[in-house]
């Protein structure tokens, strides 16, 4: 039974190591394409390719159920109107037709040129590079699983701790780059926290502590025997 479990763990480590290496190679190839694209874009005058767009939004609501006033929108329940929220009235106009109140808003022009494209490429390259670094630590962990006699060993715990630590800057860099990516279009940088990624990092640290505790128990058992 023990040899069967060990063999499964080793096989899992080997398969995961191979898959991780394939993913790393694919990401490095993508990184190379982005690098070539970035060099080409940087060499071309930024005004040689531009994209300009504007969006007009018209929203209508039935006066029987909804109430739309300047800067406010609510829903009518019986004789009571419940305020749902408020919004900016800049560039917003109101109109009424056939028992409905509407809001018309023009979203400002969107201008996109090669300088913005270069920023997007840089954000992509930095994000991919951070992920590749973390994957190399994950590959080292899977390699340790591939050759270990027991998952509760100092080698596994060490590699798992290294992977958990590597995830911290990786997660931070990816979150910053995602925010910067959105700022290219909105021209307003706002930092968004990815709680799922943070939770994943936390889980890896918890697993590291569990494996470390298991390693200590395994060591005490071996010394007792």
Image (cartoon, grey):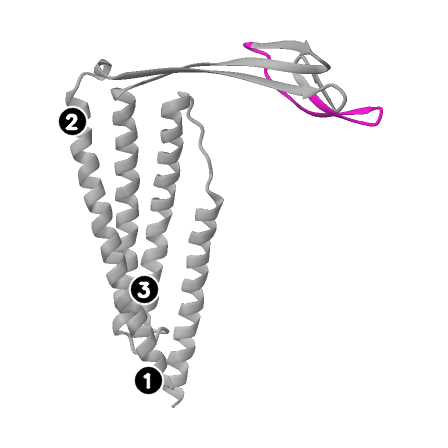
> Looking at the magenta stretch, what is its main secondary structure?
strand
In the rendered image, residue 75 lying in the magenta stretch gets the answer: yes
Say if 100 sits above or below 219 in the image.
Answer: above
Q: Position of residue 88 (x, y in %)?
A: 59, 16
- The quadrant where residue 124 appears: top left
Judged from the image, the secondary structure of the residue bearing numbered disc 2 is: helix
**Which residue is located at x 37 percent, y 55 percent?**
164
Q: Residue furthest right?
A: 79
Judged from the image, the secondary structure of the residue bearing numbered disc 1 is: helix
Real-space Cα distance between discs 2 and 3? 42 Å
Q: Residue furthest bottom?
A: 225
Q: Position of residue 61 (x, y in %)?
A: 67, 21
Residue that carries the numbered disc 2 in the rendered image: 40
**First along the sequence among labels 1 and 2:** 1
Quadrant where the C terminus is found in the figure: bottom left
Residue that carries the numbered disc 1 in the rendered image: 3
Query: Which residues are drawn in magenta?
Result: 73-91
Mark 3 in CB contact with mark 1 (< 8 angstroms): no
Real-space Cα distance between discs 1 and 2? 55 Å
Quadrant where the N terminus is found in the figure: bottom left
**Which residue is located at x 36 percent, y 50 percent?**
167
Nearest to viewer (mark 1 / mark 2): 2
**First along the sequence among labels 2 and 3:** 2
**First along the sequence among labels 3 and 1:** 1
Within-10-Å neighbours for mark 3: few <14, some 14–19, many 20+: some
**Which residue is located at x 37 percent, y 48 percent?**
168
Q: Position of residue 90 (x, y in %)?
A: 56, 11
């Amino acid at each position: 039974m023990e040899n069967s479990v060990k063999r499964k763990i080793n096989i899992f480590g080997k398969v995961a190591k191979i898959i991780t290496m394939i993913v790393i190679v694919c990401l490095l190839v993508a990184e190379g394409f982005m690098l070539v694209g970035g060099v080409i874009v940087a060499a071309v005058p930024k005004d040689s390719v531009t994209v300009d767009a504007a969006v007009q939004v018209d929203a209508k609501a039935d006066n029987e159920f909804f109430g739309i006033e300047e800067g406010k929108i609510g829903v009518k329940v019986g004789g009571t109107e419940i305020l749902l929220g408020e919004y900016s009235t800049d560039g917003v106009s109101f109109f009424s037709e056939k028992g409905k109140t509407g809001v018309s808003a023009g979203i400002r022009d969107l201008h996109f040129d090669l300088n913005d494209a270069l920023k997007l490429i840089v954000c992509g390259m930095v994000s991919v590079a951070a992920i590749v670094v973390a994957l190399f630590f994950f590959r080292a962990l899977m390699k340790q699983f591939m050759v270990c006699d027991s998952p509760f060993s100092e080698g596994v715990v060490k590699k798992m701790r290294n992977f958990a630590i590597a995830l911290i800057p990786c997660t931070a860099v990816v979150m910053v780059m995602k925010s910067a990516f959105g700022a290219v279009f909105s021209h307003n940088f706002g930092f968004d926290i990815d709680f799922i990624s943070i939770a994943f990092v936390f889980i890896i640290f918890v697993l590291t502590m569990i494996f470390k505790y298991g390693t200590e128990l395994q060591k005490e058992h071996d010394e007792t025997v």
